C-alpha cells in the first residue's frame, strides 16, 4: 500500500466548522432518498475498508462543476429541484464513489468550510457507536437506516475529527486498489497518534502497525483483512487542525493541480514526490480539502 505524507493543513485553510448534524439538514435525513453505495448488490462486506465519502457543502452546484472539471466525475441527482432536499450521487467512470449534500452552515460568514466525510464499513453500526462513546469520541448522528444506503452513523473522534460508519444494505464495493479518479487513500493527521490508533481500533476493529523504521514520519497504519486501510500521522504543526484527508488517484498530479486552479479551487500544496507517489493537496471553491495521488507505473499495475 502506498505511503502518503503531506505538510500540515493549517487552521487558516480549514477555517470554519462543519455542521455536525449535516445529514439532518433540509428534508429529514430518513426521508431523503439515499442511493445504494453498490449497484448491483454484492452481498459482501469488508469491515475496516473506507467505502464511501459524502461532501457536505453550502453550494452543491459549484462543487459538482469543480470536480467534474478536475476529475471528470459525473452525477445523478435524486429529489426535487431544491438543493436543500436532494442527494447528488458522484460517479467516477460510471462507478458510484460518493455523494454531495447541501448545508448552508457549511459556510462560516463568508468563509466556505465544506468537508468530505469518509465512511468506514462496519459489521455493527450500533456497536461502533457504543465504542465511540466509551473511547472518548462523540456520537453526532445516531445510527439510522438511510434508504438504500443502509445503517449509517456520524461521529467525532477524541480530537473532534468527523467521520462516519456504514453497514451497507446491499454489500460493500469489491475490495481492490482504487482505479484512476477513484478514492485511493486516506490519512488522519492527528496530535496524538497513540490515542487515535487505539480509538479507531476500538471502533472499527483495526490492527495497528507502526511505520517502517526507515520512514522519516511519525505515525502508524490501520489494517483490516490483511490490507492497510489508512494512515494515522503525527501533525508537524501543533496549530494545524486535526483532519481526515482523502486522496483521489490521478494519472498526472501536476495536471490535476492546474485543472483545480483553473476551475476556481485553491492549491494548498503543490505536487511533491514522496517516493511511492506524487501527491498534492487542493481545495474546492466551497472549501473542502482533498488530496490527489499519482502512482508510479509499478504501483499503478497493482
Image: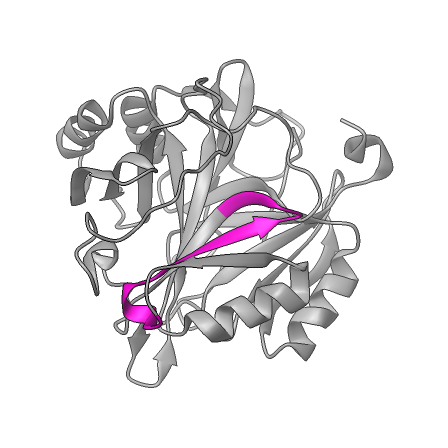
Front one among 25 and 266: 25
Could you tell me if residue 8 is visible in this image?
no
Asked if residue 181 lies in the magenta stretch, the reply is no
The reply, left or right, for residue 155 in relation to residue 93 is left
- Which residue lies at the image location 53% right of the left edge and 44% below the top edge? 96
Could you tell me if residue 266 is visible in this image?
yes
Colouring used for the render: one colour
Picture layout, residue 64 above or below residue 100: below
Quarter in which the N terminus is drawn? top right
Give the quadrant of residue 130. Answer: top left
Front one among 38 and 259: 38
Picture layout, residue 153 above or below residue 238: above
- Which residue lies at the image location 45% right of the left edge and 41% below the top edge? 52
In x, y percent, where is residue 109?
Answer: 28, 84
In x, y percent, where is residue 265?
Answer: 58, 74
The reply, left or right, for residue 283 in relation to residue 123 is right
The reply, left or right, for residue 122 in relation to residue 61 is left
The magenta segment: 81-97
Residue lying furthest right: 297
Residue lying furthest front: 80
Give the quadrant of residue 201. Answer: top left
In x, y percent, where is residue 251?
Answer: 78, 50
- Which residue lies at the image location 52% right of the left edge and 53% below the top edge? 90
Front one among 287 and 271: 287
- Which residue lies at the image location 33% right of the left edge and 25% below the top edge? 122
Quarter in which the C terminus is drawn? top right
Asked if residue 86 lies in the magenta stretch, the reply is yes
In x, y percent, where is residue 289?
Answer: 50, 62
Give the quadrant of residue 108. Answer: bottom left
Amino acid at each position: 500500500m502506498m505511503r502518503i505524507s503531506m505538510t500540515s493543513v493549517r487552521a487558516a485553510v480549514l477555517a470554519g466548522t462543519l455542521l455536525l448534524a449535516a445529514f439532518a439538514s433540509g428534508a429529514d435525513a430518513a426521508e431523503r432518498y439515499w442511493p445504494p453505495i453498490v449497484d448491483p448488490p454484492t452481498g459482501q462486506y469488508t469491515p475496516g475498508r473506507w467505502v464511501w465519502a459524502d461532501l457536505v457543502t453550502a453550494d452543491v452546484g459549484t462543487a459538482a462543476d469543480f470536480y467534474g472539471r478536475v476529475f471528470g466525475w459525473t452525477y445523478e441527482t435524486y429529489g426535487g429541484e431544491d438543493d436543500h432536499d436532494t442527494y447528488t450521487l458522484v460517479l467516477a467512470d460510471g462507478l458510484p464513489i460518493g455523494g454531495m449534500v447541501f448545508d448552508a452552515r457549511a459556510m462560516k460568514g463568508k468563509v466556505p468550510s465544506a468537508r468530505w466525510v469518509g465512511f468506514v464499513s462496519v459489521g455493527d453500526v450500533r456497536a461502533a457507536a457504543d465504542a465511540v462513546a466509551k473511547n472518548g469520541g462523540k456520537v453526532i448522528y445516531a445510527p439510522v437506516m438511510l434508504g438504500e444506503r443502509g445503517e449509517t452513523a456520524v461521529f467525532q473522534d477524541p480530537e473532534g475529527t468527523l467521520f462516519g460508519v456504514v453497514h451497507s444494505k446491499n454489500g460493500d464495493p469489491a475490495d481492490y486498489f482504487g482505479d484512476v479518479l477513484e478514492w485511493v487513500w486516506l490519512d488522519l493527521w492527528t496530535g496524538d497518534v497513540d490515542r487515535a490508533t487505539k480509538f479507531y481500533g476500538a471502533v472499527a476493529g483495526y490492527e495497528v502497525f507502526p511505520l517502517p523504521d526507515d520512514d522519516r514520519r511519525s505515525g502508524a497504519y490501520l489494517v483490516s483483512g490483511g490490507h492497510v486501510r489508512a494512515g494515522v500521522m503525527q501533525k508537524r504543526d501543533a496549530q494545524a487542525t486535526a483532519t481526515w484527508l482523502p486522496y483521489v488517484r490521478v494519472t498526472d498530479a501536476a495536471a490535476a493541480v492546474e485543472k483545480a486552479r483553473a476551475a476556481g479551487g485553491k492549491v494548498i500544496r503543490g505536487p511533491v514526490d514522496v517516493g511511492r507517489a506524487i501527491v498534492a493537496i487542493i481545495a474546492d471553491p466551497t472549501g473542502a480539502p482533498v488530496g490527489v495521488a499519482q502512482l508510479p507505473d509499478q504501483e499503478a499495475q497493482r
